[in-house]
Amino acid sequence: MAVKEYEDWGASMPHGVGAHFYPELDSTNAFAQALTCQGERGPIWIAAGQQVAGKARQGRNWVSKPGNLYCSLLFAPQIAPADIAPLPFIVSLAVRDTFIALGVNPDVAQCKWPNDVLLHEKKASGILIESSASGNSIDYLIVGIGMNLAHYPDDAIFKATSFTEVASKQVDVRVALAILAEKLKGRLDAWRLGDFEPIRAEWLSCAWGFGNKRLIRTATETFTGTLVDLNSQGAVNVILDDGTEKTIYVADIFPSCA
């Protein structure tokens, strides 16, 4: 991996956590993964002014113009692969915490399954978690986060927005990352393995779409159903229009009129 010039933002991070800011990267997740090949295990944040090959869920591109926060946390917790299920919900709550700390009204900040954060029912953040495991232990985790601070794509498959549009003010990327790092570290430190219920309950308390009919698109089918609950593995229980129940593990969810 070629050496890249970066700014050291570690002084604004929680104790023991590093942070490097690069003006441009292909993808913060990809760069973090490349660092693991050199033995890096963090905890360290990799942030970029812009990404030229940003990645989203299911192989989609992530539009990455300057002004938004594009970052990845590389760390190596001592957990098993089976323990990871709560992580997307922990991260989503931390991102929501960050928007609120920056000045967004908590009433308009919601978590959307499986790992997005909405402001006024429009997407303002996406999360992509990648991992490597050997046997029954995790080698490392990479938590990629994009937060729409200054702008948003107008052609997204789920309507999008930005912090600036919602809060009518701007925020510095470095300030946002410092808050995010603090919020996520606090939630990770409080995480008790094997006890998903407190996380599940808090996430559901600010979740979008539950109790309502939604359009659900999986890799093989599209249907409508009412989101009724989150199970102990983080999957969504749905009541279909004919009254039967279905459990959804991987899907995109939209307003029922989408």
Image: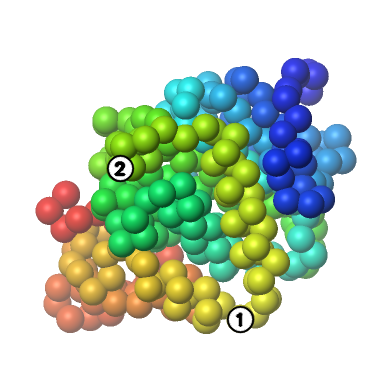
Q: Horizontal and vertical percent for residue 94?
A: 53, 57
Tell me: 27 left or right of 32. left
Query: In this view of the protein, which residue sits in the foreground, 65 or 166?
Result: 166
- The residue identified by callout 2 is 166
Q: Residue at x 81, y 46 (%)?
A: 41
Query: In this view of the protein, which residue sits in the foreground, 92 or 108?
Result: 108
- Is there CB contact under 8 Å for labels 2 and 1? no
Above-or-below relation of 8 to 56: above
Tell me: 167 left or right of 86. left
Q: Horizontal and vertical percent for residue 121?
A: 26, 52
Q: Residue at x 61, y 81 (%)?
A: 195
Q: Quadrant of residue 111?
A: bottom left
- Mark nearer the N terminus (2 vs 1): 2
Q: Residue at x 31, y 62 (%)?
A: 107
**Mark 1: amino acid:** Asp
Above-or-below relation of 23 to 207: above
Q: Horizontal and vertical percent for residue 60?
A: 43, 36
Distance, label 2 to label 1, CA atoms, is 34 Å
- The residue identified by callout 1 is 195
Q: Residues within 10 Å of mark 1 (few under 14, many from 20)?
A: few
